[in-house]
Amino acid sequence: MEFTDGYSNLSYLNITKQLCNELYENTNTNKKSKLSFYYDSDTFFNAYTYTKGTNDYMCMYVGTILNAFAHIKSAFCSSSFLLNFGNPNFEKNNHVSGKFDITQKQLLFTADPIDPIRQELSTYTALMMIRYIYGHELGHILNGHTSYISNLYAVPKLEMICKKLLSNFSEKLQEQYALDRRTLEMDADSFAASMSIDNIIMLYIQQNENPHFFNLLNDSCDIFTLWSFAIHSIFLLFEYHSASSYNSLSFYLPNEAREILSLSSSLNALNDYIKHNIFECSNTLYQKIISKIFDGINEAENYFNSIYYTNYHFIQNTNNNPIYSRFADEVLTHWNDKLYPRLKKYARVPLYHPDTIESTMEFLKNS
């Protein structure tokens, strides 16, 4: 069941909906188009977007918001993770779950972090996660993906998690569509990563305008740890809810590959801010930020592995992995040679034109 209202102004549903609308208004260059935002009452981890005429549509499954907040709340309820934030000794290691009250149209959670600082930071961090997810879905719209897929394949919408090929596609067309989709997903990830790190960099630069948030941190650079914890957790949740594989008919690169490419886009954006003197950043500060980013990645993996009894180690899995390199290079080549020029007529924002990932991979290996 889809719905657009019925919740209070302070509900998680309204706050995240307003966040999405704000992102759309700030990034959409075609002011004649409007976004219609819906929720689906299904508690599955998913979302979808489509464009019809001059109007854009996004439907976010309630389960996506539930999972995001529950995961982040659980992490901050742990006394053994994110030790530099607030006082973890107050926490009781509660594993937080959430449910959707369909009659009141509100999200209910079983617990919150006990330490007031950790409680506030859990909300900020969950919103960083949701901002990235919304950014990914908006990337599909604003980079022209929804129009391209609809016009070329007559596929009406792009789903966040969808593995079913259309039965009326020939085998050759299935492979072409799957490669297009893998490449578009990479582009949407890049859009979300750039938008997301942009927000964090600007918050850091303008931290005097939001002293309350930064007073919650021991070190202002800790915002990069929270950010990378949130973003890395997304790909861990994707892998947990819908494990991906290296397959020519897959709509997605494996999540570990997506994570590396997303991180590459984020680092490129950070370096661009420094290169163009928007962010005055010494080499010492730069190295500290990078260290904080890796702290967040490690915290995310260690926490996730501890509660789900998994053994994910994305960066290690991609190092010296020839299959990963082949699939990643295939997507980047397809983007540069085919999709980038085709999408120009549909896109409403400047399209990202990625460089090779070799330098990023070398950087990650040496870290």
Image (cartoon, rainbow, N blue to C red):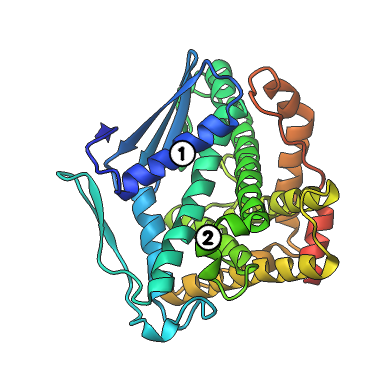
**Residue 115 percent coordinates (x, y):** 38, 77
Report the residue at 78% width, 33% height from top.
336
Is the residue 53 above or below the residue 235 in the image?
above
**Residue 332 percent coordinates (x, y):** 75, 40
**Residue 279 percent coordinates (x, y):** 77, 53
Q: Earlier in the sequence, mark 2 or mark 1?
A: 1
- Residue under label 1, please give it: 20
Left or right relative to 348: residue 104: left
Calculate the distance from the C-alpha at mark 2 to the C-alpha at mark 1.
Answer: 17 Å
Report the residue at 59% width, 32% height from top.
27
**Residue 143 percent coordinates (x, y):** 62, 29
Residue 133: which disc? Answer: none
- Quadrant location of residue 99? bottom left
Amino acid type indicated by mark 2: Ala
Residue density around tag 1, few if under 14, some if 14–19, many if 20 or more, within 10 Å:
many
Left or right relative to 61: residue 332: right
Among all residues in the image, which is located at the extreme left?
103
> Can I make out residue 280 in this image?
yes
Mark 2 vs mark 1: in front: 1
Amino acid type indicated by mark 1: Cys
Tell me the element at label 1: helix
Report the residue at 73% width, 34% height from top.
335
Is residue 60 or residue 16 the one in the foreground?
16
- Residue under label 2, please give it: 230
> Can I make out residue 159 in this image?
no
Tell me the element at label 2: helix
Left or right relative to 245: residue 45: left
